Amino acid sequence: MIDLRDEEKMLLETVRRFAKDKLAPRAPGCEQQERFDFESWDELSGLGLAAVTVSEENGGMPVGFPVLARLVEELSSGSAPLSAAYLVHCTVAHLLDNFGTDQQKQKYLPGLLSGQMMGALAISEPGAGSDVGALATTAHMTGGDYLVKGQKVFITSGGLAGLYVVLTKTGQGNGSPELTALLVEPGWPGFSVGRREKKMGQKASPTTELYFEELKVPGSALIGQPGQGLSLIMDGLNRSRVLVAATAVGLARAAYEAALDYTRERKQFGRPLVAFQGLRWMLADMAILIETSRRITEHAAQLVQAGRPFIKEAAMAKAFATDAAMKVTTDAVQLLGGYGYMEDYPVERYMREAKLLQIVEGTNQIQREVIAKEIARS
């Protein structure tokens, strides 16, 4: 377990109450209406949470990475869709803090830190998901500006964000594409938001297409160096995988607690369900998976904080915790029986939300490939 200072304990307790009292009650309505929870986003930002991944030097209120992972767990226990937007926002703020120019930081960080501007990543394309090298969105330098052409898909917070980090192909070198990251504002001519995807779950978090048609991006919007885009994005994604694991822990915990409450109250054959060995063993297995997921996630987060290699551990945490969340949420539905399949109870929503976590930030099959490669190097 991580050691927490008194102020960190207070922050986590505040966020825990916020998730329970505000996020969880609002989540079903937002899901049904496919509506982003702006009210909770504003409250989240008011707690200072939009600023926790940025250094004090650049106006942030940083917390340690293990504490950030715990914050994400708490938020996810109340609303996985809001946590998804928050996670991506934090990644964009981190990239600006570490790779942005002074001009970029002055222009964008105040809005990001206050939560008035949301950040989003634009990486995936119709023909390029796990295979980033297949990117087809191009950016050519013309007269000091980049001319961007292409399409992005599966963009979390698409249409809501005020700033996008867009991965583009700017050339070809040594047999592999040169990838460059650009900062893009949605109001620039040539930028448009495509359709909003109809998803299985996490419907309160919009996922859209983006189109770039002769989009002129000023040279000053380059983040990092030309050709540094992939390493820059992977810096953010490797950290983000730990936070996806934390999301899975929070979601699994919410499903477990709902199932536990139900089995304590529901009676069959004159006894509460929790009194039946077959069912209580399911609850025991769920508790084991949640606690193991939390520990492996904390370990990866501690490596990030210490500045030690963590790619393998981040992939392990992401794969294990999200697979565990799928198992726990599915078992929660089973424990509620027919009621578990009904929208009147939250566990069916948790199950649908958990499935996405096995796919985003690199599928769990990709995570296993990452783990295997890291093992082979050691």
Image (tube, rainbow, N blue to C red):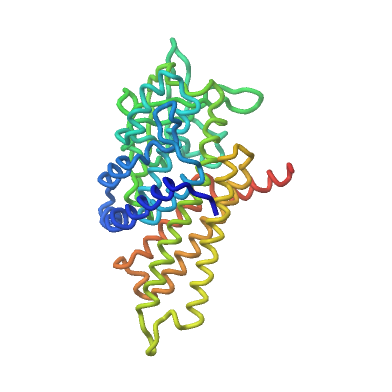
The picture places residue 268, in percent across and down from the top left corner, at: 38, 86
Q: Quadrant of the C terminus?
A: top right
Q: Can residue 346 be seen in the rendering of this structure?
A: yes
Q: Residue furthest bottom?
A: 269
- In depth, the one of 306 and 253 nearer the eye is 306
Residue at image location 52% in from the left, 39% down from the top = 237
Asked which quadrant contains residue 38, the reply is top left
Q: Residue furthest top?
A: 143
> Would you place residue 193 above or below residue 197 in this image?
above
Q: Seen in the image, is 364 located left or right of residue 159?
A: right
- In depth, the one of 181 and 255 nearer the eye is 255
The picture places residue 135, in percent across and down from the top left corner, at: 52, 32
Q: Quadrant of the N terminus?
A: bottom right
Residue at image location 46% in from the left, 69% down from the top = 331
Residue at image location 56% in from the left, 55% down from the top = 295
Q: Seen in the image, is 164 located left or right of residue 29?
A: right
The picture places residue 78, in percent across and down from the top left corner, at: 36, 55
Total labels drawn = 0
Q: Can residue 366 be seen in the rendering of this structure?
A: no
The picture places residue 198, in percent across and down from the top left corner, at: 34, 50
> Would you place residue 142 above or below residue 260 in this image?
above
